[in-house]
């Protein structure tokens, strides 16, 4: 079995945040959330990291992130570009929005040949999440089905006080296997807990705070890449035709389709750590306080590398 690779989704410019949040420091040493994730991944056993970024951000990203970690892990860059569309398709006139997380993962097909983990660049997942996922990836292989995994968090531990969030809301069976996942793109805190809207706020549907959610931390075999190639082509044939400027191909939705088709299982692995992230600029003080607390507790040294 090939050694697992860490794939980091870092192509988003952070429109709600107002800048390239992936390279925004969260401590006095200039370290970023992504640095803590790579540090945790490295001590869990990952030896290679693949960054999915925009070509236009390559210079800044290399200087602020890649060059430093390249002394400790093998580094490869993959570019998610608007022009990377399936053969026979064109970019719709006026389209500027990226094609989504499923499209992003497909972009790394040539860089990943074995099992791999997927994370977001701007989310803090915690030390145990990486060790748990690495153990899964080194002990599970595809058989009659694809054997995937996901790190699950309770919804209440992933909300922000500063606006709406997008989460993959999960239903699991008694053995902890994912049964379905629904991408909710606008979830907010409420007086009673949480709620989401699918019609720009005209109506709100309550969500239990204990709902298991995906924070886009996945464990896959390379089989997912062939499946995503088919999925992205179908997406361009169907969804882009209907919504050319805004349609996105979401990774959780494509995983859900594989579950419905009986092609895959996804084991939901619980993390003991609390997730946090910088969705909005107003989230940053809380993140900085959290990092400082983790350092004080001895989870991290003052300077990571």
Image: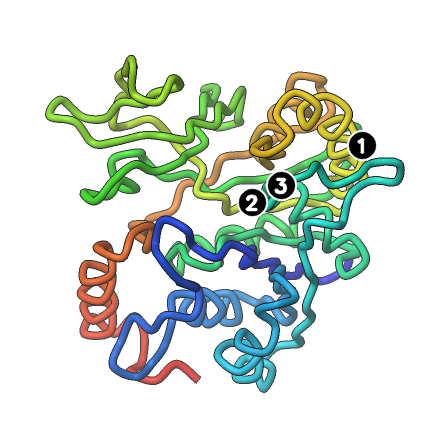
Please say if the residues under marks 2 and 3 sit with CB atoms less than 8 Å apart. no
- In depth, the one of 125 and 86 nearer the eye is 86
Q: Secondary structure at mark 1?
A: helix
Instruction: Using the numbered discs, state the Cα–Cα distance from disc 2 to disc 3 in whole angstroms.
Output: 28 Å
Specify the quadrant that holds the C terminus: bottom left
Q: Residue furthest left?
A: 191
Q: Nearer the viewer, mark 2 or mark 3?
A: 3
Residue identifier under label 1:
230
Helix, strand or loop at mark 3: loop
Counting residues from the start of the chain, the first of labels 1 and 3 encountered is 3
In the rendered structure, are the residues bearing label 1 and label 2 in contact, judged by CB atoms less than 8 Å apart? no
143 vs 15, left or right, is: right
Marks 1/3: CA–CA distance: 22 Å
For image coordinates 59% across by 46% down, the residue present is 96
| Residue under pointer 3 | 95
Circle 2 sits on which residue?
218
User: Is the residue 183 above or below the residue 117 in the image?
Assistant: above
């Amino acid at each position: 079995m090939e050694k697992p690779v860490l794939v980091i989704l870092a192509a988003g410019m952070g429109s709600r945040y107002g800048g390239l949040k992936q390279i925004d420091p969260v401590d006095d040493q200039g370290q970023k959330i992504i640095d803590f994730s790579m540090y945790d991944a490295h001590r869990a056993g990952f030896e290679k990291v693949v960054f999915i970024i925009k070509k236009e951000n390559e210079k800044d990203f290399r200087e602020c992130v890649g060059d430093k970690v390249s002394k400790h892990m093998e580094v490869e860059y993959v570019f998610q570009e608007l022009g990377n569309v399936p053969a026979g398709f064109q970019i719709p006139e006026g389209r500027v929005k990226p094609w989504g997380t499923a499209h992003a993962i497909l972009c790394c097909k040539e860089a990943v040949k074995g099992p791999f983990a997927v994370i977001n660049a701007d989310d803090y997942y915690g030390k145990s999440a990486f060790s748990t996922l690495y153990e899964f990836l080194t002990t599970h292989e595809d058989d009659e089905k694809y054997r995937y995994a996901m790190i699950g968090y309770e919804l209440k531990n992933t909300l922000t006080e500063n606006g709406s969030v997008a989460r993959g809301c999960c239903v699991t069976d008694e053995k902890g296997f994912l049964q379905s996942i629904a991408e909710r793109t606008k979830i907010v805190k409420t007086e009673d807990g949480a709620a989401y809207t699918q019609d720009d706020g005209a109506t709100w549907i309550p969500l239990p705070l204990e709902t298991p959610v995906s924070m886009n931390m996945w464990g896959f075999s390379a089989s997912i890449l062939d499946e995503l190639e088919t999925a992205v082509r179908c997406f361009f044939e169907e969804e882009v035709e209907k919504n050319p400027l805004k349609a996105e191909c979401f990774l959780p939705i494509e995983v859900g389709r594989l579950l419905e088709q009986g092609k895959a299982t996804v084991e939901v692995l619980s993390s003991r750590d609390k997730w946090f992230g910088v969705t909005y600029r107003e989230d940053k003080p809380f993140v900085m306080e959290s990092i400082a607390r983790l350092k004080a507790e001895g989870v991290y040294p003052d300077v990571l590398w």
